[in-house]
Amino acid sequence: MLRKNVSFINCSFSKILLIVASGLAGFWLCRTIFTPEKTYAAPVTLNTLPNRALKWHGEEKNENKVPDNYIEVQRNAPKVSYSTKQTLEKLLEKERLERNKSPGYPVKLAQDEVFVGASMGYRGNAGLSKLKDNLRDPSFVGKIQDLEAKRQGLYISILRRRGQIVETEQGDVIVSYPQAPVMFPNNLKKPLDNWSKSEKIWLNITHFPWPEDETCQKYSVTFGKNIPIVGLASYPSSGNTWIRYLVECASGIFSGSMYNDVMLRKKGFYGEGLPEDSQIVLTVKTHGHTTGDGSHVDRDQQQWYNHMKEVNETAILLIRNPFEAIIGHRNLDQGGHTGLAKPEEFTGAGWNTFVKIKADAWLNFYKDWLEGTSSDKILVIHYEHLKLNVRHTIRRILDFLNLEEDEGRLGCIDLYPSGHFKRDHHRQTIENPFTVSQKEMISNSIHELDQYLARWGKERLPTKLYKYYN
């Protein structure tokens, strides 16, 4: 009987300790999140940031791994993790339950959704109609904006504690590194005049591409000012992302895009999330009619999807061997930016149709550009030449963009010529996926484009460097 009572007392005491500890943990966590950031004893400048952030990053790597989108809160015991995404889900669930009493509406937040107005749980035609009606209600729109502001505020407080927001004479600066990128919002693809005061902090983001190199860590990438709009036009999987990395590092200015790829933003290409006409990015990526809606329209309509007007009918045209570009496009469609398609995706009727459509799209895209604007507004860059001599190609691009060369930056590019997106092609098991008839189709496209380049006085295709081409 005594043992039972002692056991009961120990059990109750343990529960009480657990409840008290949990309460203290919750209090400490809330206090950590919402109390003002402490100032540093030593002055902080952008030049001192790389080592400091890497120190933080190194300490975090030694801790136990936690899932993506989680922030680790350090203390003696216990250790608490919380998710900014889960916090937003709770806010959204409350809002949805208030607006829609029907149990049929889902309340789960889309996995990669950041803009809360697009994830309020509306599905189908009826749901879309209801959403449109609610968006006419100023109070509803205000609540959506308030939820997004709360989410952004929470994340900004996290960055401050990490040391990735620093006060300077020019205002707060968000600092980014390849080892510690930030989650750039995906709802800023709108005119800069429509940005709220709190959103404009994202215009002050600074990315250090080489923070671990003592010589190169001082170089950073930021947004520019009053930059002429110039396209970076290419067929998919032709090295567009690599060129963007090189141009950003050589110039110190972010590049932009007609799209809003979350994977690219997560790797530090923050200009991806800005409107293409902002004039604070150096070049604007476009694949024209070769992707999206343009890939499903008739030939006589394709030119309207090439974004030529949007980029001032001026562009760097990046051309790659279509044999390898088509393989890369298949990998992109099936495996994302860094993955690979399965071997069976390169055989059969589906692959044959893919090759025919893409060989035509590759040719037509570049023909449209050569015919649609004046020759002096186009710089043709061949991917194969870029691989042979990165520095020479970058100098040609800087000259086309009327930018001065920085020998220090070019030296760092020599040391780190690769970007963050690189497929491991050693895992690719297919040696030659093209049939005789497929080779003939692609070769015809190569021959025709080569004649077009000659007619317009542009550098012709380096076919001697083309794999699979006879």
Image (tube, rainbow, N blue to C red):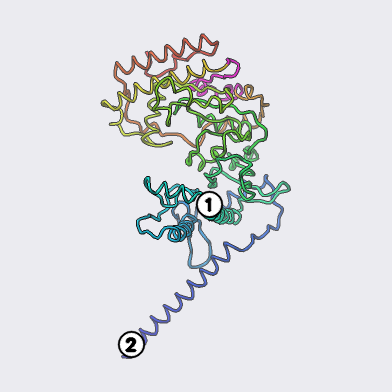
In the picture shown, does residue 427 fall above or below 47?
above
Residue 332 image position (x, y, % from top left): 40, 33
Asked if the residues shown at circle 1 and circle 2 are in contact, with their CB atoms under 8 angstroms apart, the answer is no
Write down the region rendered in magenta.
Answer: 374-396
Closer to viewer: mark 1 or mark 2: 1
Which residue sits at x=56%, y=23%? 315
In the picture shown, does residue 461 fall above or below 192?
above
| Prevailing secondary structure of the magenta residues | helix
In the picture shown, does residue 433 fall above or below 11?
above
State the image quarter where residue 360 is shown: top left
On residue 141, which mark appears?
Answer: 1
On residue 3, which mark appears?
Answer: 2
Instruction: From the viewer's perspective, tell me whether residue 426 is left or right of residue 263.
Output: left
Residue 272 image position (x, y, % from top left): 54, 37
Q: CA distance from mark 1 to mark 2?
A: 62 Å
Which residue sits at x=44%, y=79%? 16
Which image quarter holds the N terminus?
A: bottom left
